[in-house]
Image: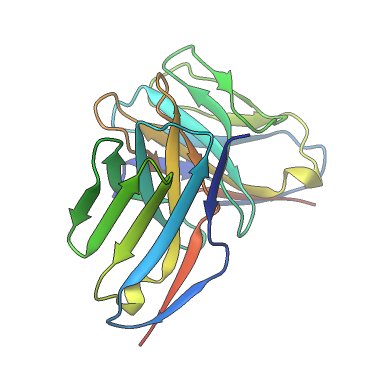
Amino acid sequence: EADIYQTPRYLVIGTGKKITLECSQTMGHDKMYWYQQDPGMELHLIHYSYGVNSTEKGDLSSESTVSRIRTEHFPLTLESARPSHTSQYLCASSGDISYEQYFGPGTRLTVT
Amino acid sequence: SQKIEQNSEALNIQEGKTATLTCNYTNYSPAYLQWYRQDPGRGPVFLLLIRENEKEKRKERLKVTFDTTLKQSLFHITASQPADSATYLCALRTNNAGNMLTFGGGTRLMVKP
């Protein structure tokens, strides 16, 4: 079982609210990622980080922002949630030696 | 444009048979390819990695082949069990520095008892 955690697991929130999705890992990995996945669809990379104070946008444009102040923590923030943000958000990390990515359980976000 | 294709139709097989899933890609020259398993509502779980200079990799009942000329990987599960039912994703590394992966859409496997 990978040591990567996401909270909350499920979130239903109204339009216009600010939300932060939490992601933490205890493996000491430098590289962390956020993916967005709609039901039955492929994962799309929306943000990644090479280490502390490093953040980059991924292939899929997203209105969310991320921060990386500590190695173990990579939160994602939506300043003003909209129904179009309804999706599953998956956090992952990878080390320097092995190339596999370890995924958290995901946060299923519903914006009403 | 770069593309990773997996059969979007579900694969239904009988318990005990070998399941074979296909991953085709275009416009990539990946150093390696990975396979993940994803269960409904969960994050993907890493299964196997195969490098461009490897033709075949095995792990227990799993076998992966990698043909860089055909730009194709095949993923086999021998002696399949109902517990193997899940969606299987292939992924290619698309950025050397960040270990970034691009995922295919996955193939859903259903193993019937």
Q: Residue at x 32, y 83 (%)?
A: B15
Please, which residue is most extreme toward the left here? B60
Considering every residue shown, the one lying at the far front of the view is B69
Residue A56 visible in the snapshot = yes
Q: Name the residue located 22 percent from the left edge and 50 percent from the top edge.
A: B57
Q: Residue A14: horizontal and vertical position, in percent?
A: 79, 46
Q: Is residue A80 above or below residue B60?
A: above
The answer to whether A50 is drawn above or below residue A12 in the figure is above
Q: Position of residue A11 (x, y in %)?
A: 64, 50
Figure quadrant of residue B81: bottom left
Viewer-nearest residue: A25 or A54: A54
Residue that extends furthest to the bottom in the rendered view of this protein? B113
Judging depth in this view, the residue of B87 and A32 nearest the camera is B87
Q: Is residue A105 visible?
A: no
Where in the figure is residue B112, as x and y percent of width and height?
A: 40, 84
Q: Quadrant of residue A39?
A: bottom right
* Along the viewing direction, whichever of B82 and B49 lies nearer the viewer: B49
